[in-house]
Image (cartoon, helix red, strand yellow):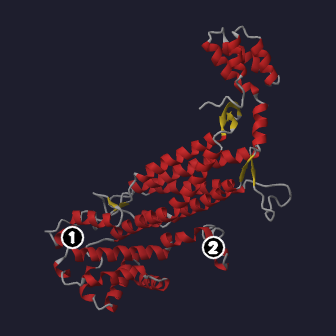
Amino acid sequence: MSKSSLLAVSPVDGRYARQTEPLREYFSEFALIRYRIRVEIEYFIALCEIPLPQLADFDAGRFESLRDIYRNFTPEEAERVKDIEKTTNHDVKAVEYFIKEKFREMDIMKWGEFVHFGLTSQDINNTSIPLSIREAVENCWLPLMEEVLDIIRRMAEEWKDIPMLAKTHGQPASPTKVGKEFKVFQVRLEEQLRQYSLLTYPAKFGGATGNMNAHKVAYPGIDWPAFADSFVKGLGLRRSCPTTQIEHYDNLAAIFDNMRRINTILIDMSRDIWTYISMEYFRQKVNKNEVGSSAMPHKVNPIDFENAEGNLGMADAVLTFLSMKLPISRLQRDLTDSTVLRNVGVPVAHEIIALNSLKKGLGKLILNEAAIEADLERNWAVVAEAIQTILRRENYPNPYETLKALTRTGSVINHRTISDFIDGLDVTESVKEELRAISPMTYTGF
């Protein structure tokens, strides 16, 4: 950890800086400027490809040199943009002036006024930011999410035949399988990821108030809405239309809500595993150099799942705020979305921290079959459901009430208790044999 990270206000850029460093390529101020330049350059190239009459003589062979402006963008150049902003007091206008400086250096300023032609700042922001979110999610978040999901899948398969006492309301309940309980989380996550795959990243691209007024008045013969649709699609986004001056953010809110649901599932899983560890169903691999407690030498705490739960909760809080706030803007626009959008990387960072913790925690789990078997053996009362169900099938009088009277006396219910009960039933021997075959270890359903 560098000295600068020790001075960071947020743990995202401080304590956890090594984990979140890849996100700087998408959510830092430097990254935002570079994405804005990327959109401006690609827009200029798209205008050349129409071509607009005044751009018909622009050499298409220079397109890649133009793209190098953002591909080779440096922190020093970002500082130049910030210096320009000190004069303009407008961040997007500073980007436009920076690009025009580059045009002068390349001796192509003849076409410089077509940089940012007919646009408003939100045409740039509302394409740059969704693009940065999509690429961060696809390059950083999704691969890590799939790694965690693959671990869960392996556990579901590896432990699919291990019987385990279920707990409903914290009380012993009909047995289940260890692998099946992991399968529940697997399927829940897979469903949310399927829903995520159906979502689109929205972009607003329509001029000062969404109607492409300036474009139409300058070139009334061009189908500008079709151009805008195609341009935005080329960036991997989907154009929202109609809009006001800004993106209405409904689809972006849907993405945030989907991520929040995934986080909530992971919180649920983290709490369950934490509880299983406290029940000694799982042990954790020990690192001899790690300290569990500053006072109690014996402790090996489930800190990875606690860390994950805390960071997922932080992410959920910010995502909830973003999805509720961003779709609301006074009339054709106010500026509240601008400052809020600068925090989009914060929940993603907390999710990255949480997913890394889950990877580490899941990798340390050791199944303690002895403890699981002992808990099943202590809870023969859970086969009461099975017995009373078969007795119902046999039309035995009051089977539920009979088993209720047996199992709620406060006395210990063990194998012998159940065996003696079965022996005393007025049913055929074949039914008794069927009942004797039931145990907490075998009564696990499908």
Residue at coordinates 38% horizontally, 79% vertically from top-left?
Answer: 95
Residue nearest the viewer, comparing 179 with 94: 179
Which part of the image, by quadrant, shows the C terminus? top right
Q: Secondary structure at mark 1?
A: helix
Q: Which residue in the structure is indicated by mark 2?
A: 8
Residue 87 position within the rendered picture, expressed as x and y whole percent measured from the top left: 41, 84
Q: Which residue in the structure is indicated by mark 1?
A: 215
Q: Considering only order in the chain, which callout, 1 or 2, is on the residue closer to the N terminus?
A: 2
Residue 57 position within the rendered picture, expressed as x and y whole percent measured from the top left: 19, 84
Q: Is residue 390 above or below residue 63?
A: above
Q: CA distance from mark 2 to mark 1?
A: 45 Å
Q: Amino acid at mark 1?
A: His
Which part of the image, by quadrant, shows the N terminus? bottom right
Residue nearest the viewer, comparing 342 with 430: 430
Which image quadrant for residue 241?
bottom left
Q: State whether residue 410 appears in this view.
A: no
Which image quadrant for residue 307?
bottom right
Residue 353 position within the rendered picture, expressed as x and y whole percent measured from the top left: 61, 62
Q: Secondary structure at mark 2?
A: loop
Mark 2 and mark 1 residues within 8 Å of each other at the beta carbon: no
Q: Amino acid at mark 2?
A: Ala
Residue nearest the viewer, comparing 117 with 334: 117
Side of 180 relative to 253 (left or right):
right
